[in-house]
Amino acid sequence: MFYIKSNFPQHHNENYKADKLKRKLISFFGSKLQFWQRYGGSGDLVYSEDVPTGQAEGVAFDYATTEEECVVQAALILRKTVLKGFEDALPMKWPPSLEDLKSEGCYPDLIKTFLTYLYTKQGKVKSESCKRRVDSTAQDICFNVTKGRWKLPKHILLGMAVPQQLVDILYARTEAEINPCDSTDSTDNLNSGNEDDDDDDYDDDDDDDGRCDDDDDWVCSDDDDDDDEN
């Protein structure tokens, strides 16, 4: 139907079902034709049995009429690549070694190529920050496509770091409930010395007016000493 619509629009009928045309082609040509279902079940690619499937798919991709079709096709290719990589990946031993936690080569190269062209115009990663973004996104794609079954170094390291931070927080809270006085001192120390800094701002003014520390209403002066002697 796509071929007829593109090349013979005057003969194209929107109400004519593609399944009906497919049955007629099969009944007339038999095994001489091959059918390949396109993405999303939007139709079948029809080609001769003498044409390799890969070549037929390439031609169909070149003749894609919209950018959306190109994006859908790319997404399906990446999905297929990720699932194949997950099936072929070796299970990670536990606890993992430093070599196991290296992200280099842990995901399919096709994902890296896609993200490199997505993040850079020339398809070349020049900065270390861009390399980290490509690496991080690639591992997230593999993790999400497999619904969390494929755990790559990024997610393993994240899972090891976050619980330790939670343990530290829970330990501090528990200590605060058991020993409130000690925990108060500890909390004061964690405030980066802010209160001490506030005290320092006022230390220089404590004795400037001659007031005694014990009684703010009493003013120390030389005249008071003379009265006592008399």
Image: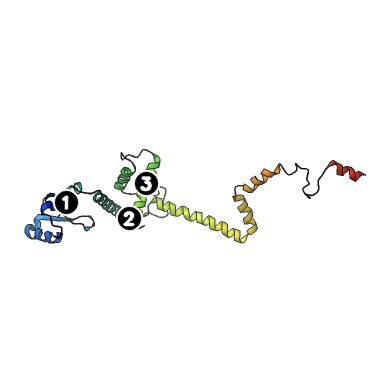
SS at badge 3: helix
SS at badge 2: helix
Query: Quick one: label 2 or label 1, which is nearer the N terminus?
Result: 1
Locate residue 213 relative to residue 16 in the image: left or right: right
Tell me the residue that label 2 is attached to: 145
| Residue type indicated by callout 3 | Asp
Residue 103 in view of the camera:
no
Q: x and y percent of residue 83 in the render?
A: 29, 55
Q: Looking at the image, do the residues carrying marks 3 and 2 touch, with CB atoms under 8 Å apart?
A: no
Q: Residue furthest left?
A: 28
How far apart, in angstroms, are the residues tagged by discs 2 and 1? Answer: 26 Å
Dot 1 alpha-carbon crowd within 10 angstroms: few under 14, some 14 to 19, many 20 or more = some
Locate residue 204 relative to residue 86 in the image: left or right: right
> What number of labels is visible?
3
Tell me the residue that label 3 is attached to: 135
Residue at x-position 24% and y-position 51%: 69
Q: x and y percent of residue 116 in the render?
A: 32, 43
Dot 2 alpha-carbon crowd within 10 angstroms: few under 14, some 14 to 19, many 20 or more = some
Tell me the residue that label 1 is attached to: 53
| Residue type indicated by callout 1 | Thr
Locate residue 96 relative to residue 24 in the image: left or right: right
41 and 129: which is toward the camera: 41
30 and 106: which is toward the camera: 30
| Residue type indicated by callout 2 | Val
